[in-house]
Amino acid sequence: MKLVTDSWRGYDLLGGHLALDFVNTVSWRLDPARTFDRLDAPDFLTLWLARTDLVPGDPPSGAAEVIDPLKQLRETVYRLLVATDPADVTSFRERLAAARGLAVAEATLPLQWTVPIKRMGDVIPALTLAADNLLRSPDAALVRQCSGPGCGWLFLDRTRNHSRQWCSSQDCGNRERARRHYRRTREQH
C-alpha cells in the first residue's frame, strides 16, 4: 500500500474539473528532468478513479491494459486545451464518436451523458465525455496553466478578476513567493 501513498504524494485534485484533474496526472510536465507520470505508478489509476468518484465503489480490474490508451487521450486533451491542433481535433472526434455510442443519460433535464463503467476499458470513453463537456462549455475559456516554473498543471480560474496564477497557492505559489523573498534579501545584502 506504500506505493499508492507515494504515487499520490504531491498530487491533489486542483483542476476544478475531472478532465483537468486527469490531465494533471503528469507532474512537472514542463520540466523534463522532473516529469513524473503518475499513471505509471502501480495502483495510482484505481486510487484516482476512487478519489474522483468516476467509479463508485471498487474499480474493475485490468488497469494495466488501459494505461497506454489513457495516456494518449490525456495528451490529446492537454494539447486541445493549451494549443488546439487540427490533428488533435480529429483524434478527439474519433474517440468522442466511440464514446457517444456507449453513453446513456438519465431521463432528467439537463441531460447528462455518461458511460457506465462496468469494465476498466469503459474509463476511456467516460473520460472522453468528461473532456468533451469541458471543451464545449464556457469553462473552457477559464482554463489556465500554472505559472510555476516547470509545473504545467491546468486549472479553472474562477477568481473574480481571472488573476489566478498557480495550481496551488500553497505549492507553486509558495515556491514563487519564497523565490521572490530570497531575491529581495540577496539584493539588500
Image (cartoon, rainbow, N blue to C red):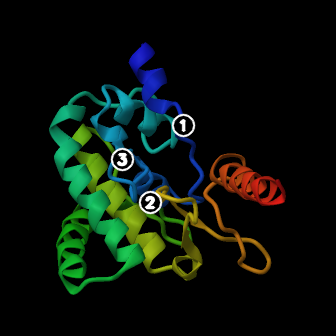
Left or right: residue 114 compared with residue 146: left
**In the picture, residue 157 is in which quadrant?**
bottom right
Q: Which badge, 3 or 2, is on the more N-terminal residue?
A: 2
In this picture, is 186 found above or below 113?
Answer: above
Labels 1, 3: front one: 3
Left or right: residue 122 compared with residue 171: left
| Dot 3 crowding, Cα within 10 Å, few <14, some 14–19, many 20+ | some
In this picture, is 143 found above or below 86?
Answer: above
Q: Which residue is mark 1?
A: 10
Element type at marker 2?
helix
Element type at marker 3?
loop
Question: Quick one: which residue is furthest to the front in this view?
Answer: 189
| Dot 1 crowding, Cα within 10 Å, few <14, some 14–19, many 20+ | few
Q: Which residue is mark 3?
A: 35
How far across and down, in percent of the image, does residue 85 sit? 26, 83
Left or right: residue 90 compared with residue 59: left
**In the picture, residue 62 is in which quadrant?**
top left
How far across and down, in percent of the image, does residue 58 sit? 40, 26
